[in-house]
Image: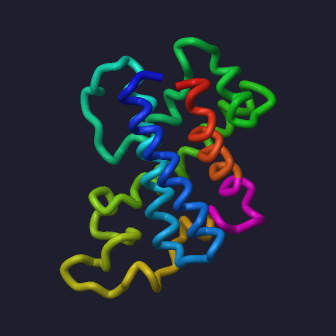
């Protein structure tokens, strides 16, 4: 891991720690989604700094790209799969295809990508506010937090492992 990656990774860890603290204390979903979105954005940015040079363009739209490209130059995709809790590389590849929908929704929680729609930071629509994020029921949060939805639980597990195991694959 180079120095720039370490900076992004440290912030991803901190954002994720706040997400877990908020979740444990059952703070409204808007706050949890805000920190989860930021943690995923930062771990993706850490990954894209792997060359030691600034990526061509870093925006809020990086988490989906991170999942698509996730592999380490020093190891096989199978090793990454194992680090992220998958027994077989093919299981990881299959999961990535299915998880991209949730990843895209999470990525779009950034206000600049929400297109005046629901986001965890600002009332919307911006020109005639009807909802405060704190009172809104986010469909994405229902998918992530529902214990009966394996896909949501699994993406949360993979996000946690991606952050915690970053020094091993980043």
Image coords of residue 60 (percent x, y): 33, 47
In depth, the one of 35 and 126 nearer the eye is: 35
What is the span of residues highlighted in magenta in the rendered image? 144-153
Residue 167 vs 44, above or below: the answer is above
- Location of residue 72 (image quadrant): top right
Q: How many numbered callouts?
A: 0
Q: Is residue 168 above or below residue 76?
A: below
Q: Residue at x 31, y 56 (%)?
A: 113
Residue 128 image position (x, y, % from top left): 22, 85
Tell me the quarter of the picture where residue 119 sits: bottom left
Going 48% across and 54% down the picture, which residue do you hit?
A: 15
Q: Quadrant of residue 95?
A: top right
Name of the residue lying farthest toward the right? 87
Residue 151 forms part of the magenta stretch: yes
Frontmost residue, 115 versus 144: 144
Residue at 70 percent across and 56 percent down: it is 153
Q: Which residue is drawn at 70% across and 30% down?
A: 83
Can you give x and y, in whole percent of width and height, for residue 58 in the image? 29, 37
Residue occupying the far top of the picture:
74
Q: Which color scheme is applied?
A: rainbow
Magenta: main secondary structure equals helix
Closer to the camera, 141 or 18? Answer: 18
9 falls in the magenta region: no
């Amino acid at each position: 891991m180079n120095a720039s990656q370490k900076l992004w990774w440290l912030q991803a860890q901190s954002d994720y720690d706040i997400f877990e603290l908020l979740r444990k204390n059952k703070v409204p979903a808007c706050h949890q989604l805000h920190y989860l979105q930021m943690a995923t954005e930062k771990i993706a940015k850490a990954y894209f700094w792997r060359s030691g040079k600034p990526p061509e363009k870093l925006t809020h739209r990086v988490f989906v790209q991170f999942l698509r490209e996730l592999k380490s130059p020093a190891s096989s995709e199978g090793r990454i799969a194992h680090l992220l809790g998958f027994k077989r590389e093919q299981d990881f590849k299959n999961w990535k295809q299915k998880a991209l929908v949730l990843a895209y929704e999470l990525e779009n929680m950034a206000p600049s990508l929400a297109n005046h729609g629901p986001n965890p930071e600002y009332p919307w629509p911006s020109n005639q506010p009807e909802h405060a994020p704190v009172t809104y029921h986010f469909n994405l949060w229902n998918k992530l937090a529902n214990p009966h939805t394996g896909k949501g639980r699994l993406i949360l597990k993979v996000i946690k492992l991606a952050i915690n195991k970053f020094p091993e694959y980043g």
